[in-house]
């Protein structure tokens, strides 16, 4: 029997066109709220062997290049908490929730042959030098997305394995669309995701 995979992206552009046995595709819409709703509805109705979240991302560092495809080893909600003057305190540090419901560690058993990175999931992408520096220092993150931790949270609630694969389209910096390369990121993302699905579904 073919393994059942749910492939999740926020937009049609990020979704691959290739078809595989056992693969179902879900386009959620952008952001945590739409993603949480869409993935919850799917997992409540159908059992999957693996959920794969794919898309583009911004990088905080030059260690990850534009167009590079990466595997997210750790993702977290970076805005769930309170501001204390210029300091941000995560909700779990305040005792309002468990750290495991804010910070998510990927299962190494499903790791693709890609560089592992740490990620932030945000509602508002960074575009201010001061907040970029503050959050990079506090969270020691490599990349940011708008959906990753939401997918991880829902999968953990349903006890379904998940993996997140992202391609870098831009630097995280004061907004500079001229420096972005979305077509390259999408091209490389699709190539790596298709290779990963083929290899995973054909494992003995």
Image: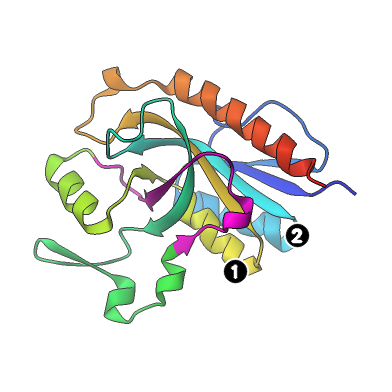
Position of 160 compared to 119: left or right?
right
Determine the residue positioned at 46% across, 19% down: 184
Which marked residue is nearer to the observer: mark 1 or mark 2? 1
In this view, the residue farthest toward the bottom is 95
Whether the magenta-drawn stretch holds residue 43 is answered as no
Where 13 sits versus 80, above or below?
above
Q: Which residues are magenta?
A: 104-126
Going by the image, does 197 lie left or right of 80? Answer: right
* Residue at 54 percent of width and 54 percent of height: 151
Residue sitting nearer the eye, 109 or 72: 109
Judging depth in this view, the residue of 204 and 72 nearest the camera is 204
Q: Dot 2 lies on which element?
A: helix
- Residue wearing tag 1: 157
Q: Position of residue 31 (x, y in %)?
A: 45, 47
**Is residue 116 covered in magenta?**
yes
Which residue is the extreme one toward the right?
1
Query: Where is residue 160, by image quadrant?
Result: bottom right
Above or below — where is 174 with respect to 53? above
User: According to the image, label 2 marks what residue?
Assistant: 45
């Amino acid at each position: 029997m073919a393994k059942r995979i749910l492939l999740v992206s926020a937009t049609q552009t990020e979704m691959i066109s290739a078809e595989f046995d056992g693969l179902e595709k879900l386009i959620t819409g952008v952001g945590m709220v739409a993603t949480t709703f869409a993935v919850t509805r799917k997992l409540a109705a159908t059992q999957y062997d693996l959920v794969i979240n794919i898309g583009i991302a911004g990088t905080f560092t030059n260690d990850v290049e534009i167009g590079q495809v990466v595997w997210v080893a750790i993702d977290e909600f970076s805005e769930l908490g309170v501001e204390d003057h210029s300091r941000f305190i995560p909700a779990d540090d305040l005792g309002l929730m468990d750290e495991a419901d804010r910070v998510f560690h990927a299962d190494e058993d499903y790791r693709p042959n890609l560089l592992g990175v740490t990620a932030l999931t945000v509602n508002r992408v960074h575009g201010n030098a001061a907040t970029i520096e503050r959050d990079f220092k506090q969270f020691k993150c490599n990349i940011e997305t708008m959906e990753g931790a939401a997918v991880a949270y829902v999968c953990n609630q349903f006890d379904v394995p998940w993996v997140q694969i992202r391609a870098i389209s831009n630097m995280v910096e004061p907004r500079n669309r001229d420096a972005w390369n979305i077509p390259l990121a999408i091209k490389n993302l699709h190539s790596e995701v298709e290779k990963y699905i083929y290899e995973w579904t054909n494992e003995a």
